Amino acid sequence: MPSGPDHIAEGKAALDGSKALHVAIIMDGNGRWAKARHQIRTFGHKAGVDALKKTITAAGDLGVTHMTVFAFSTENWRRPAAEVSDLMGLLKAFIRSDLDRLAREGVCVRIIGQRDGLPADILSCIHDAHERTRHNSRFFLQVALNYGAQADIVEGAKAFARRVQSGEARIDDLTPDAFGGFLSTHGLPTLDLVIRTSGEHRLSNFLLWEAAYAEFVFQDILWPDYDGAALKAALDEFYRRERRFGAVEAGHVPA
Ligand code: IPE
Ligand code: IPE
Ligand code: MG
């Protein structure tokens, strides 16, 4: 297994008996929201943090047990330096100002993505968030920061290859389930639903492996306008879908 915190696995055990519901959100549209108000993009990112707080609270009430949000992609470094630094500052402020409350409310916080390239103060915030919430199990919040699914898969492949090289594993030990244990989402339940806001219809390198059988809901809402009602609408749509996982429709009796 990768050398990450394994509190998710501990928490998963604590959730036994209740059904997990894992929702991922590509929080998109902050820049367009700010532009419509003749403001700079950072204004939209600030409003986006408020929308995230509202959505986390609503998610727990709506029966979501695990929520993974895309906060900053490995490709977002291509943005102007000032915007990148404002985004990092906002993420740091969010972790610092909300950690006490999240910890008190039983939220287990885990930041997924590459650590390389992140500033030292962010790394120390991440460490704090993991340490202070690792035993919580009421709700699991994953924040994807400096995350790219292709890089995550490549890192996982390298980690497994190193095990083979050292004699700790054999090539044939690798199954889809086992490989999932080498990704930064290891220990999380199957991804049920991916939501993308702002009217874009793409994954942008988010959870490529994990979304194999997830449902997709695209909403024409800019992220800063997102709230519990919007999440409820997405979940209503999710519950109307029939998930077959490659089999035939529910209730079908084989001949
Ligand atoms: C999402 O909003 C936030 C991040 C990607 C960090 P955008 O900043 O992508 O907003 P748009 O897509 O330009 O409107
Ligand atoms: C995806 O949004 C990344 C996050 C929401 C953090 P982008 O706005 O970066 O994606 P593209 O560039 O439109 O594909
Ligand atoms: Mg965008």
Image (cartoon, grey):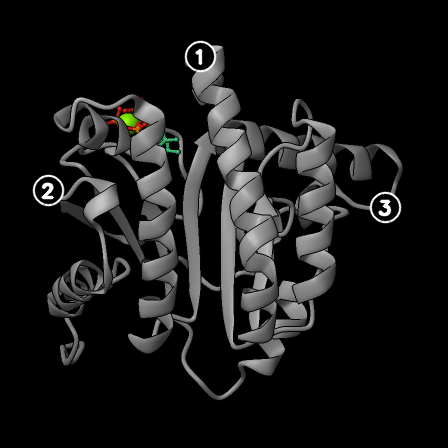
Q: Nearer the viewer, mark 1 or mark 3?
A: 1
Amino acid type of the residue tagged 2 in the rendering: Asp
Sequence-earlier tag: 1 or 3? 1
Between 87 and 196, which is closer to the camera in this rendering? 87
| Quarter occupied by residue 160 | top right
- Give how far apart the Cα atoms at labels 2 and 3 are: 48 Å
> Helix, strand, or loop for circle 1?
helix
Q: Position of residue 134 (x, y in %)?
A: 69, 65
> Helix, strand, or loop for circle 3?
loop
- Give how far apart the Cα atoms at labels 1 and 3 are: 39 Å
Is residue 240 visible in the rendered image? The answer is yes
| Relative vertical location of residue 190 with respect to residue 252 in this rendering, above or below | above
Residue sitting at the far right: 166
* Ligand 2 quadrant assignment: top left
- In the rendered view, does 175 fall on the left or right side of 254? right
Between 161 and 79, which is closer to the camera in this rendering? 79
Q: Residue at coordinates 23% horizontally, 58% vertically from top-left?
A: 227
Q: Residues within 10 Å of mark 3 (few under 14, many from 20)?
A: few
| Relative vertical location of residue 110 with respect to residue 135 in this rendering, above or below | above
Q: Residues within 10 Å of mark 1 (few under 14, many from 20)?
A: few
Report the label total. 3
Q: Residue at coordinates 14% horizontally, 81% vertically from top-left?
A: 251
Q: Which residue is mark 2?
A: 220
Q: Are marks 1 and 3 in contact (CB under 8 Å)?
A: no
Amino acid type of the residue tagged 3 in the rendering: Glu
Q: Which numbered disc covers residue 78?
A: 1
Q: Residues within 10 Å of mark 2 (few under 14, many from 20)?
A: few
Q: Position of residue 85 (x, y in %)?
A: 52, 22
Q: Which numbered disc covers residue 168?
A: 3
> Helix, strand, or loop for circle 2?
loop
Amino acid type of the residue tagged 1 in the rendering: Arg
